[in-house]
Amino acid sequence: MSELYKLGIEAAAKGLAKGDFSSVELTQAVIDRVKAENPRIGAYLTFDEEGALAAAKTADEARANGRAGMLLGIPVAIKDLINVKGQPCTCASKILKGYVSPYDATVIKNLKAAGATCAGRVNMDEFAMGSSTENSALGRTVNPYDVTRVPGGSSGGSAAAVGGDMCIAALGTDTGGSIRQPASFCNCVGLKPSYGRVSRFGVTAFASSLDQVGPMTKSVTDAAFLLQALAGHDEMDGTTPDEPVPDYAAALAGASLKGVKIGLPKEYFIDGLDPEVKRLTDEAVAKCAAAGAELVEVSLPHTEYAMAVYYIVAPAEASANLARFDGVRYGHRSEKSDNVFNLYARSRAEGFGPEVKRRIIMGTYVLSSGYYDAYYGRALKVRTLIRRDFEAAFAKVDALLTPVAPTPAFKIGEVQDPLTMYLNDLFTIPSSLAGNCAISVPAGFTAGARLPVGVQFIGDAYREDKLLRVAKAFEEAR
């Protein structure tokens, strides 16, 4: 088997440009790798082999005719809640099993315009609700570094595909940490762009004021290349500002930590961190200092309320967004119904999994008459205070450095309590609520079990260029 599947975007693009191999050969290497590894890892739900090879052939023909581009002919794995015309879009849920998308999401149009190949659909927690990919109704995904452990979630399939060299890069989505936490667990780079930087049109909504599509890659440079194709204004998504997109690759040139002010939020360095996560985070801090960064202790005083705010806002928005899956228009329809009410109730009961039902019930409760102001309205006010904390911090520093998750990848089935599972997003939720950009970068491996651990850098809103520059400098310092 050719080992071209090990390449990232930058290396693959250079090889294609020099004619060392073709896009068809690169794609075939990925296909062979998926066939060999997916039965063990379970990253992919479906893979359109014929379509991927056809797209690769088209890319080779375009290159022969003089076209160039970093993503031309590059196979990219797609999280299974992003619509790709002619492919399934199940959100890893029984309620959408068999559904085939009739259109492309904007991010997919952008990828195709750049010449990338949408290679296959990767697994996730159902409707992106979870931190382990154990909530998928359509299959199990394991961690490529230890198959007894979870890959993280909800973008666990994307992370496992990248970390297991089953794709060149992947798209994930991040609502409260669903790109960054699995990236940390699977030893890859995961970037959550600022809210609105990337269009959400054609991406199945979980929580509309939080969801963001982002790259999951093998290096920070690859994340910059992929974000370049994804980012920008979209008339189909009113939350995307009509502003120029920086040249992210150019921002990486000469990346250095000398003179960079890195904030260490005291609320993130808490008791209860796994000892190995603490060790590797402390080592990351030391590496930044050795590379010339100025370390500054900062405070984000409303961090302690972020978890409570998130689990009011996100379920509230989910309960509204998921109302469209009713057994009438498309998706699963119960055959046991004798009236309209039973049709709705039974279709949803049969189609949704336990975690989705839990969050719909939570969201409906906090939005209900008599509770809206006490819960949802108050949560929005505290969310504003959390955002102001970040604004004050970024007036003093260039980026923040924090852990990504409290622990490395945990064993499959080990975490049964929903509240304990929610704590996996303890360090990623605040920046999501604030709308900032954030990135998980590999920081090393635990002693003994040799499990990957990432470190998180958080940047000011719409300063992905600065964030990527800091992350690249750290990556080189390691």
Image (cartoon, grey):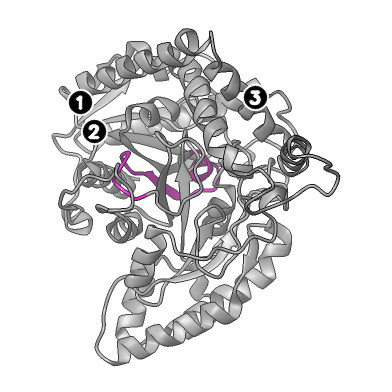
411 on left or right of 66: right
Figure check: 1 above or below 216 = below
Rendered location of residue 90, percent (x, y): 63, 54
Quarter placement of the N terminus: bottom right
Figure check: 348 above or below 424 = below
Residue placed at 19% from the left, 26% from the top?
397
Q: Gap in Å between the C-alphas at discs 2 and 1?
A: 6 Å
Identify which amino acid the numbered label 1 is placed on: Phe
Give the residue pinned by disc 3: 361
The label shown at residue 256 is none
The residue at the far front in this view is 339
The label shown at residue 460 is 2
Identify which amino acid the numbered label 2 is placed on: Asp
- Of helix, strand and loop, which one carries label 3? helix
Q: Gap in Å between the C-alphas at discs 1 and 3?
A: 37 Å
- Give the camera-side residue of 399 and 288: 399
Q: Quadrant of residue 234?
A: bottom left
Callout 2–callout 1 Cβ contact below 8 Å:
yes
Q: Gap in Å between the C-alphas at discs 3 and 2?
A: 34 Å
Between disc 1 and disc 3, the foreground one is 3
Neighbours of disc 3 within 10 Å: few (<14), some (14-19), many (20+): some
Highlighted range, magenta: 181-199
